[in-house]
Amino acid sequence: MKTQAHELTDKQKEYLLILAEECSEVIKVITKTFRFGLDSKNPYIPDSPTNKEELIQEIGDVMAMVELLKDSALELTDDSLKLAKQKKIDKLNQWLNNKD
């Protein structure tokens, strides 16, 4: 239950916690990709996905949580997210070493 302006609802807390978990899964796949390659699979699990397939799934999971957060009264809107995304792209275009 929300009691003060700075407190989160239980639903918002749950969504943010799941988002954090999903972000950590993306980080895990990225580090595996650096170590073993994009097309690498877990050699101990038959029919396991490649790191690329796992990365696609985990980024999709993050995107799903962002969509749920947009509906959870955190004032995340398509417009505010598009603006933040464009600011990041502009900053990266200015500072990236590899602009290919």
Image (cartoon, rainbow, N blue to C red):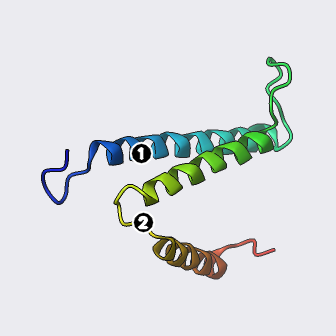
In the picture, measured across the screen, residue 41 lies left or right of residue 31, that is right
Going by the numbered disc 2, the residue's amino acid type is Leu
Q: Is residue 94 left or right of residue 49?
A: left
Quarter occupied by the C terminus: bottom right
Q: Residue at x 59, y 39 (%)?
A: 25
Q: Quadrant of the N terminus?
A: top left
Disc sitting over residue 53 in the figure: none
Task: Find the distance from the CA under tag 1 to the CA under tag 2.
Answer: 13 Å
Disc nearer the start of the sequence (1/2): 1
Image location (x, y in percent) of residue 66 = 51, 55
Q: In the rendering, at what x and y percent does residue 30 appear?
A: 68, 45
| Position in image of residue 69 (x %, y %) | 44, 55
Locate residue 23 relative to residue 69 in the image: left or right: right
How many numbered marks appear? 2
Above or below residue 8? Residue 85 is below
Q: Residue at (57%, 50%) from the top-left corner?
A: 64
Residue at 56 percent of width and 72 percent of height:
85
* Residue plotted at (38% across, 55% down): 72
Out of 24 and 8, give the one closest to the viewer.
8
Q: Residues within 10 Å of mark 1 (few under 14, many from 20)?
A: some
Could you tell me which secondary element the residue under label 1 belongs to? helix
Disc 1: which residue: 15
Q: Amino acid at mark 1?
A: Tyr
| Disc ID at residue 76 | 2
| Identity of the residue furthest to the front in this view | 71
The quarter of the picture where residue 96 lies is: bottom right
Local crowd size for mark 2, using a 10 Å CA cut-off: few (<14), some (14–19), many (≥20): some
Secondary structure of the residue carrying numbered label 2: loop
Q: Residue furthest left?
A: 3
Residue situated in front as seen by the camera: 89 or 32: 89
Q: Are marks 1 and 2 in contact (CB under 8 Å)?
A: no
